[in-house]
Image: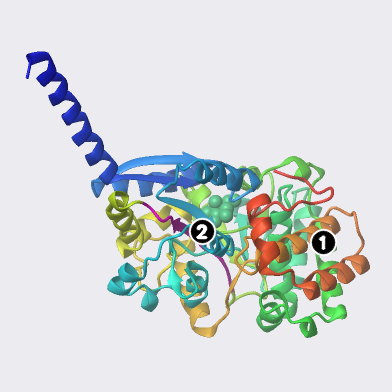
Amino acid sequence: MSRLLSVVWCVSAGLLAGSVFAQNKEVDVFHWWVSGGERASMDVIKHTMQERGLVWQEGVAAGSGTARYTNVLRERVAAGRIPTAAQMIGHDIHAWARLGLLTNMNELARKEEWDEVVPIAIQALSKYNGNWVAAPVNAHSTNWLWVNQSLFDKLGGKEPDTWNDLIVLLDKAKQAGVLPIAIGSEAWEHTLLFESVAVSTGGAEFYRKAFIDLDPAALRPALLKKIFERMSKLRTYIDAGFSKRRWDQATDMVREGKALLQVQGSWVDGEFAHRGLVPNRDYYCFRFPDTQGVFLFNSDQFIMFKLPKERRDAQLTLASTMMQPSFQSALNVATGAAPARVDVSTAAFDYCGRKAISDMRGANMRRTMMGSIAMGNANIPPVKVAIYDVVTRHFTRQIGTDQAVIELRNAIREKPTAGNELKNVLRTSSHTPPLRSAPRK
Ligand code: GAL
């Protein structure tokens, strides 16, 4: 072999070995975490995986499983650039599984006893046809009030225990010239408010029957009317600027003392932590009144794609690491969520994190840990989208309360099927429905 040839051979053999090595260790993770707190959370994942010797690659499309996110992922998958794992929430997981694209992780799950530690309601989403296809990394909950402490204390506020207490507090803020509620423009945010009001007004059993079991008998018009009336009442405490705002901009308003509170998921806790805020010094986390004991969850999960054999080891290391208690502790100190396991120590968490964990454990035992409608953990996408449509049009005054009651009952009674679901999952957003005129991402 000539010298030149052997150099070429050595270099290419080296490159080949290098690329095989890199490919074997490489994980390519697709996600939507871009806000300050979310980026900090993703960095926890990235650094942990790098410490485990994995070579980290990531793809990002902002917007919590929106059309944009789903489309970018779909295009990637269609072009054969299949990620190792992709962030996914709720019933969207099953839609991807139904396409036959996800791998079966039962062996790892059995070895690590995931069945024993992951809350039951989350497992129902992580498994498809009884097989583990996703690794759940947290359990956010949505039925919270995030309250600016200094405004609250100046108002002489009391933690609202009931709906009437909440109204007293919001009125106090209004009278003092403080914006009572900060909210953003999107249908999922309005639905997030709606689900807290629904469970608060109708109770846990009603929520389960009406919104999870989709039992038409639970949809009593008088009760639905009361829920929508309460939504109309809450609308009197928001500002006109809401229609141009994102959820994290509403969070900023609470942080900066421009609004008293926000009703949002525990990712707000992640944003506050990222900005150096401390619970019970800078802000309070109260459960939405009359929902104490209920945990409306949204679990961030990572679906695991079917991959060629040489990428499988790194994928298993990724999944196994994601499920470790120490990792879930570190990650969720950053996200603001509870871990997606009941056995993680509360030691590293702040006050709100510890409260989230103990609420989750209690709710898991009592079956009051129920999927968030807004975040797609309660229903298949077409049902969720139908609920979004009614709730946001009512919230933005496009339909009145009586019409909203009729339309919500129809939407739930019609129960769109899983066949439609597939089409919708791949064509529309998880948070943003194809609304007639509601604000879109
Ligand atoms: C959710 C996600 C949270 C947070 C939130 C913000 O879907 O589970 O982790 O990213 O969206 O929109």
Asked whether residue 299 is drawn in magenta, I would say yes
Q: For mark 1, give the secondary structure.
A: helix
**Residue 175 appearing in the image:** yes
Label 1 vs 2, first from the N-terminus: 2
Between label 1 and label 2, give the one nearer the viewer.
1
Q: Is residue 217 above or below residue 226?
A: below
Direction from residue 251 to residue 3 in the image, left or right: left
User: Would residue 260 be counted in the magenta stretch?
Assistant: no
Q: Label 2 belongs to which residue? A: 280
Percent position of residue 294, x then y: 59, 76
Describe residue 266's horizontal placement relative to residue 291 as left or right: left
Please tell me in which quadrant of the rendered image residue 237 appears. bottom right
Q: Residue drawn 23% across and 46% down?
A: 53
**Disc 1 marks which residue?**
390
* Residue type at the position of mark 2: Asn
Main SS class of the magenta portion in the image? strand
Residue 95 lies, in percent from the top left, at: 58, 61
Q: Amino acid at mark 1?
A: Val
Mark number, residue 323: none
Quarter of the figure with the C terminus: top right
Considering depth in this image, is 99 or 384 the residue closer to the camera? 99
Image side of residue 165 versus residue 233, left or right = left
Q: Quick one: label 2, few (<14), some, or many (20+) residues within 10 Å? A: some
Q: Residue at x 71, y 48 (%)?
A: 184
Q: Where does the image place residue 97, in percent across and percent down from the top left?
A: 51, 62
Depth check: give the residue in front, 408 or 343: 408
Q: Which residues are magenta?
A: 295-307
The one nearer the camera, 260 or 206, is 206
Going 56% across and 61% down the picture, which residue do you hit? 285
